[in-house]
Image: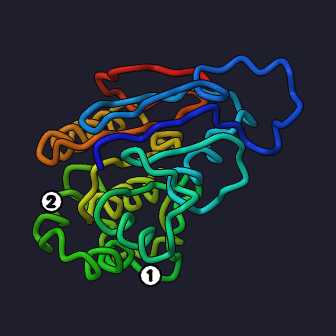
C-alpha cells in the first residue's frame, strides 16, 4: 500500500457539530508510505476512532477513506485479513495483551503467524527497550509502561507499509521513549514504511513529516 486518503471524513458521533476545528476531520488528507505523521489531540477528539477506522475495526464515520484509491467500505473480510497481515500494523492504546501469558509468549503469538522475526531478533528488541528481564514474566505482573514496550515489539513482528501507534509512550520516560523511537526509525527505514502516531501530550520523538491537530 502506497497511500491512505481521507476525504471529508468525520466520526458519526460528531455529526451536526458546527464548531469542529481540525487538520484531519472534514478535510482532504493524504498519508504517504515512507513518511511520519503525528496526530496531536485532546481527549475525546476521535484519535482512537481514527485508528480503528484505518484498521477496519469500525466504520461509524461519514465521508470516505481510501487505500490506494479504493474505498475501504468496499473491502471484504478476506481483504482486511490480508491487509492486516501484510500492510497494516496497529498498536492499540489499550494494548490488548494476554495478562496470563509471558511477555515473550504475547509476542510469539503474532510472530508464529507471520514468521517475520527470529527469536534472537525478538530478544534483541527486548534488550534494546530495557525489558529483557521481563521476557518470561506474565504481562499482568509488569507495569503498563513495560506492557507498552511488549505490545510495540509485537506490532513489529509482521510486514507492514504503515504502522499506526495510538499513544505509544504515554507511560514511558524520555530514555525509554527515545529507545523506542530509535528502534522504530530503523524498522521504518528498512521497510520504507510510513507511521501514524497519536498523542494527547508526550509524543514519540521522531522526525515527523507533518504534525496535524485533531
> In screen coordinates, is 203 left or right of 186?
right
Residue 194 position (above or below residue 115): above
- Residue furthest to the right in view is 16
Quadrant in which the C terminus is drawn = top right
Q: Check disc 2: other Cα within 10 Å, few if <14, some if 14-19, many if 20+.
A: few
Measured in 3D between alpha carbons, the distance from the residue under mark 1 to the one under mark 2, in whole angstroms, is 20 Å
The residue that label 1 is drawn on is 101
Place of residue 129 in the rendered image (x, y in percent of width and height, measured from the top left): 27, 50
> In screen coordinates, is 5 left or right of 135?
right
Nearer the observer, 169 or 33: 33
Residue under the image location 55 percent in, 48 percent down: 51
Residue at disc 2, secondary structure: helix
Q: Check disc 1: other Cα within 10 Å, few if <14, some if 14-19, many if 20+.
A: some
Residue 90 position (above or below residue 116): above
Q: Along the polypeptide, which appears first: circle 1 or circle 2?
A: 1
Q: Which mark is residue 73?
A: none
The residue that label 2 is drawn on is 124
Residue under the image location 45 percent in, 68 percent down: 80
Residue under the image location 37 percent in, 55 percent down: 152
Residue 34 position (above or below residue 93): above
Place of residue 137 in the rendered image (x, y in percent of width and height, measured from the top left): 39, 75
Cβ atoms at labels 1 and 2 below 8 Å apart: no
Nearer the observer, 70 or 147: 70
* Quarter where residue 106 is shown: bottom left
Residue 207 position (above or below residue 43): above
> In screen coordinates, is 122 left or right of 153?
left
Place of residue 81 in the rendered image (x, y in percent of width and height, measured from the top left): 42, 73
Place of residue 40 in the rendered image (x, y in percent of width and height, measured from the top left): 56, 25
Nearer the observer, 117 or 175: 117
Amino acid at each position: 500500500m502506497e497511500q491512505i486518503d481521507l476525504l471529508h471524513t468525520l466520526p458519526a458521533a460528531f455529526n451536526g457539530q458546527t464548531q469542529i476545528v481540525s487538520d484531519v476531520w472534514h478535510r482532504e488528507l493524504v498519508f504517504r508510505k515512507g513518511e511520519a505523521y503525528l496526530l496531536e489531540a485532546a481527549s475525546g477528539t476521535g484519535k482512537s476512532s481514527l485508528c480503528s477506522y484505518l484498521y477496519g475495526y469500525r466504520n461509524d464515520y461519514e465521508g470516505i477513506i481510501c487505500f490506494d484509491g479504493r474505498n475501504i467500505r468496499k473491502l471484504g473480510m478476506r481483504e482486511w485479513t490480508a491487509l492486516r497481515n501484510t500492510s497494516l500494523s496497529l498498536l492499540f492504546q489499550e494494548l490488548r495483551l494476554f495478562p496470563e501469558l509471558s511477555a515473550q509468549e504475547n509476542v510469539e503469538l503474532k510472530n508464529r503467524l507471520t514468521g517475520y522475526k527470529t527469536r534472537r531478533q525478538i530478544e534483541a528488541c527486548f534488550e534494546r527497550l530495557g525489558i529483557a528481564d521481563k521476557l518470561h514474566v506474565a504481562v499482568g505482573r509488569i507495569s503498563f509502561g513495560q506492557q507498552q514496550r511488549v505490545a510495540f515489539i509485537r506490532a513489529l513482528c509482521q510486514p507492514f507499509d504503515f504502522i499506526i501507534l495510538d499513544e505509544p509512550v504515554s507511560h514511558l520516560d524520555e530514555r525509554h521513549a527515545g529507545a523506542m523511537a530509535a528502534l522504530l526509525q530503523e524498522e521504518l527505514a528498512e521497510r520504507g514504511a510510513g507511521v501514524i502516531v497519536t498523542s494527547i501530550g508526550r509524543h514519540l520523538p521522531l522526525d515527523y513529516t507533518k504534525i496535524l491537530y485533531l
